[in-house]
Image: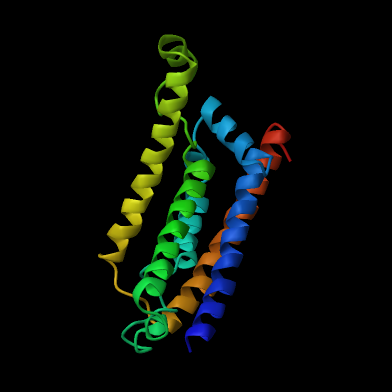
Amino acid sequence: MGGMRAASQIISYELAMGIALIALLLVTGSPSLKTMVNIQTDGVWNVVKQPLGFMIFLICVFAECNRTPFDLPEAENELIGGYHTEYSSMKLGFYLFAEYINMFISSAVITSLFFGGYDIPFVNDAHLQQSVGVNWMALIHVGMLFAKILFFLFLFMWVRWTIPRFRYDQLMNLGWKILIPLALFNMLLTGALILLKQNNWHF
């Protein structure tokens, strides 16, 4: 049961996540994370350009990390503890630790894709670098990146203690009937707006 739920969840949410990324690639014009961060440093963050894509991607990341309310592969109350019946002691500890590593990496990806990576909001990085020097600027950028990552880790934990788990049928309805159509609509709308902009707003 747990394996079936995990496979169904992966299929339904990976599709919506990939389509949301396609819309973001249309906006940035590059699959490189470095290029995406540099574009956001010089202008506005991608979350402003792609708010619907960000929400879809964030929901899919929760499902990807098996966090509440999408932790059906665990389902402690329904599957007699899920994988807890097979692992204990340090093996279970490493298993749970791997989930938090997944959360950390996912938070870093969200930060880079939609929130400017190491970019400091409302601050001109060039002027600040002239004031504090290159080395201090690098440390400030690293600190800003980790601050954004910690915010999303807090969001992961906050949602876990706030929202109850979905039923399996609710999970499938959300994935196939809501997220995928919304992601397709977002992709088509983004492509249409880019075409209109390239043609000076004329068909």
From this view, report whether residue 97 is shown above or below residue 4.
above
Counting from the top left corner in percent of width and height, residue 35 is at 63, 35
Counting from the top left corner in percent of width and height, residue 94 is at 42, 67
Tag count:
0
Q: Which residue is drawn at 34% across and 75% down?
A: 89
Q: Nearer the viewer, residue 59 or 178?
A: 59
Q: Which residue lies furthest to the left in this view?
A: 162
Q: Is 68 positioned to the left or the right of 25 in the image? A: left
From this view, report whether residue 188 is shown above or below residue 134.
below
Q: Which of 201 and 26 is in front in this view?
A: 26
Q: Nearer the viewer, residue 50 or 92?
A: 92
The colour mode here is rainbow
Q: Which residue is drawn at 44% across and 29% down?
A: 141
| The image quarter in which residue 163 lies | bottom left
Counting from the top left corner in percent of width and height, residue 9 is at 52, 75
Counting from the top left corner in percent of width and height, residue 187 is at 62, 54
From this view, report whether residue 63 is shown above or below residue 198.
below
Q: Is 152 positioned to the left or the right of 178 in the image? A: left
- Quadrant assignment for the C terminus: top right
| The image quarter in which residue 28 lies | top right
Q: Which residue lies furthest to the top in this view?
A: 131
From this view, report whether residue 130 is shown above or below residue 31.
above
Q: Is 193 positioned to the left or the right of 69 in the image? A: right
| The image quarter in which residue 7 lies | bottom right
Q: Which of 125 and 24 is in front in this view?
A: 125
Q: Is 6 positioned to the left or the right of 75 in the image? A: right
Q: Residue at x 68, y 39 (%)?
A: 29
